[in-house]
Amino acid sequence: FSTFHCKMFLSQRLATFCPRVAKVNTIHLRPYHPSDLNNIIQIFTEAVHQLGIKYYSPAQLSAWAPSEPDLQRWGDRLESMVVLVAEQGTTIIGFIGYDGAGLVDLLFVHPAFARLGIATMLMQAVEQLAIADGVSELKTKASMVARPFFESRGLVVIAEETVTIGGENLRRFAMGKTIEPAY
């Protein structure tokens, strides 16, 4: 399925696959809207700077999540994939991107909501979308911060990588796992 196809049926699929996980403690999942862009960038920036401090230098964090983000680049990136946002009430507290072919991208939760099951909820929804798309393997490029979460979801490290962003080298991990429909 293409990213367009995924977006077209996203609301229907969320209704089908997420009722068990999407209504926990008033947290619900919904598709991304372009009007969410600034909130998404804010969550990304705060998560990178607050949760990444144990793993990356201040210069690396600033390169990864600069104080002046490229809004056009962000908008284009988010529009190129299926993005789910987690909300509590009307406040966005996390998001995940999925390309329709098995790549999980941009899984971030606001630091105030870290370790409360939000990332798990988002990941479960994407796993169900991937299974519905006929995808047999999920992949991601995990930061040192995210690696333990993805390992807890069954992904294994395929390779350690170094990516250069804004002149800074950051360590990350190519990870993957085979998925199958639950019968």
Image (cartoon, rainbow, N blue to C red):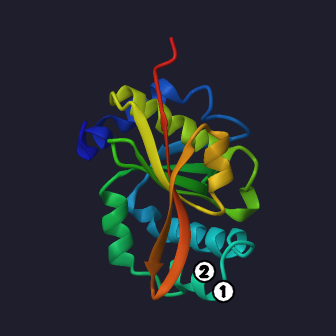
Residue appearing at x 60%, y 35% in the figure: 22
Label 2 neighbour load within 10 Å: few <14, some 14-19, many 20+: many
Instruction: Say if mark 2 contacts mark 1, CB within 8 Å.
Output: yes
Residue appearing at x 47%, y 51% in the figure: 140
39 or 100, which lies in front?
A: 100
Tag 2's secondary structure?
helix
Image coords of residue 100 (percent x, y): 33, 42
Mark 2, residue position? 61
Q: Quadrant of the N terminus?
A: top left
Give residue 51's quadrant in the image: bottom right
**Mark 1: which amino acid?**
Pro
Q: Is residue 87 left or right of residue 141?
A: right
Asked whether residue 119 appears in the rendered view, the answer is: no
Tag 1's secondary structure?
helix
Of all residues shown, which one is farthest toward the front?
159
Q: Which mark is residue 31?
A: none
Image coords of residue 81 (percent x, y): 34, 52
**Mark 2: which amino acid?**
Leu
80 or 170, which lies in front?
A: 170
Image coords of residue 109 (percent x, y): 63, 58
Residue appearing at x 30%, y 67% in the figure: 76
Mark 1, residue position? 58
As displayed, is residue 72 above or below residue 124?
below
Label 1 neighbour load within 10 Å: few <14, some 14-19, many 20+: few
Give residue 90's quadrant in the image: bottom right
